[in-house]
Image: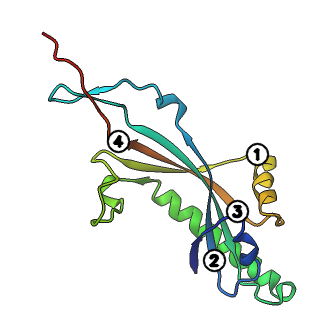
Amino acid sequence: VEVKLATPHSFATLKAITKSTISVFLYRVSEHAELRNNPQRRLPDGTLRRQPLVLECSYLITTWGARGTDPASNDAAAATEEHKLLGIVLQGLYDHAEVGRAELFEDPTKPPVWGERDELQIFLETLPIEDLYRIWDSSELAYQLSATYRVRVLGLESTEVLRTPAVV
């Protein structure tokens, strides 16, 4: 099984794949509204730092069974494979719904991205059917078996340190 990042333009190529595939499509990025106005943090040296940015990324996870060049004859087998794959995805993301700092990947040749308190929360998001169809309309394809997930990124630190005068 292949896992691919998808774009609206790449969905058309997935219809005739020859190997079962799971596509991951990022369709929305937003700030977590309840945590937007957290207060600034004062560090031990007296400097202020902005509150961490809490992002929510919404993903469409789609399973694609191998239909090949003759989709009509392979449709039943491909649909069965898609159901099995979606079950595996649902179970895997449920089992790993919280990703701690130790499990987050960083490229050692680049500046650090993750802070020491950063983590991810992954949860199934139930969209109204109209919203789900709207996502599929953007790719100009018929609906495909899929699930939507929200990934909450907790605590992206600001690189800006606010200088304040010492209280005397």
Q: At numbered mark 4, what does the secondary structure look like: helix, strand or loop?
A: loop
The C terminus appears in which quarter of the rendering? top left
The circle on residue 157 is: 4
Q: Is residue 130 left or right of residue 111?
A: right
Measuring 80% from the left and 54% from the top, which residue is drawn there? 133
Task: Identify residue for label 1.
Answer: 128
Q: Which dot, 4 or 3, sits closer to the camera?
A: 4
User: Alpha-carbon neighbours of circle 3 within 10 Å: few (<14), some, or many (≥20)?
Assistant: some
- Badge 2 or badge 4: first in the primary sequence: 2
User: Alpha-carbon neighbours of circle 1 within 10 Å: few (<14), some, or many (≥20)?
Assistant: few
The circle on residue 146 is: 3
Q: How far apart in space, not on screen, are marks 1 and 2 (Cα)?
A: 25 Å
User: Alpha-carbon neighbours of circle 2 within 10 Å: few (<14), some, or many (≥20)?
Assistant: many
Residue 136: which quarter of the image? bottom right
Q: How far apart in space, not on screen, are marks 2 and 4 (Cα)?
A: 34 Å
The circle on residue 21 is: 2
Q: How far apart in space, not on screen, are marks 2 and 3 (Cα)?
A: 12 Å
